[in-house]
């Protein structure tokens, strides 16, 4: 295929709503970014990250050097966790304001970058809180500049205007989308992802897979979203097994990162629907649940529910994962079982019951789906009517393998 003709070590410039440096060695563009920030009279930056990945990945050494060489002062907030909370955002924003931060440099996967985007809003809207932001008490028009150094191949947040943060008091996990939080610059360097643990490699890639499958099958889809989906699914099916077998394979990491990036661009315009809307309450209630695992548990049941309404599109884009689909409404279960078999073949065998959910939790989860403003908005984009019964059916069918076929 065409991939063989690409030099993965040649850094490309890709423009979405953000300016993205993409390719092995892209981290070295941090010096050019720092110079640009200095030219914009940005002298103080808040660095937002988790406890260790920003160092273990190899991202921090050249970043620290670039900031120091360009006389940009920085303060590090390294307390971002998976499924970051409004408390963390408020705490970091307070530190940033007291420091006088003029921009946010987020280093990590979706959690640090989404938290960083949220913090950037609060640096400009100093009288607001993260909870007010995520409960839609105000709609920000401006944010401090965000620079994203992406360390995973899943969320696509380095290329889009979305962010997700949990509100612990309500056990909800809303999403926001504002033009002002497109990163000013992003770095997608596949070499920074080689230290990802095997499970995280799986889960972040499943997130990207869901981004495109939802963006190509909702009521706002477009030919571009379908094109991106076909390519992302093909690349994921081809290169995810390679990365799982050899974490240091830079070609596999390159194309998985590319797939995740175009998936982010795809749902930035075409949006999402069932799988993300139903997963957010799950990891809102159980913050320890990896987002990608939650999506994997739901995906087969979602495909079964929507397949008939989008059979021609889904049969085409799913060909690398579930070959032989004909695009007829009657093969919905075949498509769902095929996806589940593929997930199980990669080692993702958990269902809701395995993660401690009980059937009596369905009412609570369903309530959260419809009462969390951003999630209710996603349901309106679903290709089939998204009433409470439909949501409950998807949750129920996700408690165990469909037809028990995938456990053989």
Image: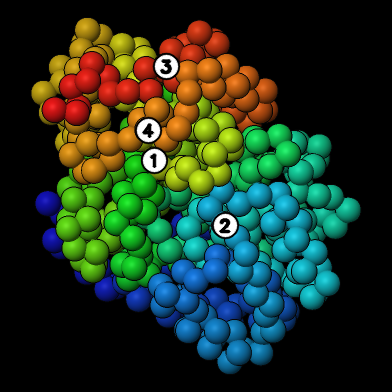
Total tally of numbered discs in the picture: 4
Are discs 1 and 3 less than 8 Å apart at CB?
Answer: no
Q: Residue 293 carries which label?
A: 1
Can residue 76 be spotted in the picture?
yes
Q: In which quarter of the image is residue 253?
A: bottom left
Give above or below for 164 relative to 294: below
Could you say whether the residue bearing mark 2 is in a helix, strand or loop? Answer: loop
Measure the alpha-carbon separation of dots 2 and 4.
23 Å
Dot 1: element: helix
Which residue lies at the image location 54% right of the left edge and 22% below the top edge? 361
Frontmost residue, 213 versus 397: 397
Disc 1 packing (10 Å; few <14; some 14–19; many ≥20): many
Q: Label 2: which residue?
A: 81
SS state under label 4: helix
Comes first in the chain, label 4 or label 1: 1
Nearer the N terminus, badge 2 or badge 4?
Answer: 2
Pointer 2 local density, CA inside 10 Å: few below 14, some 14–19, many at least 20: some
Whether label 4 touches label 3, CB < 8 Å: no
- C-alpha span from label 1 to label 3: 17 Å
Disc 3 target residue: 396
CB of mark 2 within 8 Å of CB of mark 4? no
* Residue to which mark 4 is pinned: 354
- Kindly report which numbered mark, 4 or 1, lies closer to the viewer in this rendering: 4
* Residue at the right extreme, as displayed: 127
Upstream in the sequence, badge 1 or badge 2?
Answer: 2
Residue 148: % across, % down: 54, 64
| Between discs 4 and 3, the one toward the N terminus | 4
Q: Rate crowding at label 3 as few (under 14), some (14 to 19) or many (20 or more) other CA atoms within 10 Å.
A: some
Compared with residue 273, is residue 355 higher up or lower down, i.e. above or below?
below
Residue at 18% over, 50% down: 241
Q: Is residue 398 left or right of residue 50?
A: left
């Amino acid at each position: 295929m065409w991939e063989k003709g690409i030099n993965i070590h040649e850094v490309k410039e890709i423009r979405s709503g953000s300016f993205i440096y993409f390719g092995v060695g892209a981290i070295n563009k941090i010096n050019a970014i720092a110079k640009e920030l200095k030219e914009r009279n940005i002298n103080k930056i808040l660095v937002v990250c988790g406890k260790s990945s920003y160092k273990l990945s190899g991202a921090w050494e050249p970043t620290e050097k670039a900031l120091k060489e360009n006389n940009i002062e920085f303060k590090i907030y390294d307390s971002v966790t998976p499924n970051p909370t409004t408390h963390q955002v408020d705490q970091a924003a307070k530190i940033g304001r007291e420091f006088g931060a003029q921009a946010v440099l987020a280093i990590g996967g979706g959690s640090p970058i989404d938290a960083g985007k949220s913090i950037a809003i609060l640096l400009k809207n100093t009288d607001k809180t993260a909870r007010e932001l995520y409960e839609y008490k105000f709609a920000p028009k401006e944010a401090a500049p965000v620079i994203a150094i992406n360390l995973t191949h899943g969320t696509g947040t380095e290329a889009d205007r979305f962010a997700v943060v949990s509100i612990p008091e309500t056990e909800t996990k809303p999403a926001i989308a504002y033009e002002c939080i497109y990163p000013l610059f992003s770095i997608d360097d596949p070499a920074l992802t080689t230290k990802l643990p095997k499970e995280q490699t799986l889960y972040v890639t499943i997130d990207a897979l869901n981004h495109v499958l939802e963006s190509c099958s909702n009521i706002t889809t477009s030919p571009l979203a379908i094109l991106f989906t076909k390519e992302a699914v093909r690349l994921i099916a081809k290169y995810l097994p390679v990365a799982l077998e050899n974490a240091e394979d830079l070609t596999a990491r390159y194309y998985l990162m590319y797939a995740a990036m175009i998936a982010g661009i795809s749902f930035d315009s075409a949006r999402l629907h069932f799988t993300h809307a139903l997963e957010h309450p799950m990891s809102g209630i159980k913050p320890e649940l990896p987002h990608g695992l939650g999506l994997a548990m739901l995906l087969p049941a979602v495909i079964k529910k929507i397949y008939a309404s989008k059979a021609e599109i889904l049969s085409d884009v799913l060909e690398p994962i579930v070959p032989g689909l004909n695009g007829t409404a009657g093969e919905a279960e075949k498509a769902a079982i095929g996806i589940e078999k593929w997930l199980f073949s990669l080692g993702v065998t958990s269902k809701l019951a395995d993660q401690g959910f009980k059937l009596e939790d369905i009412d609570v989860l369903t309530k959260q789906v419809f009462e969390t403003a951003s999630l209710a908005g996603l349901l309106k984009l679903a290709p089939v009517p998204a009433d409470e019964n439909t949501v409950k059916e998807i949750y129920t069918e996700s408690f165990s393998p469909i037809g028990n076929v995938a456990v053989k």
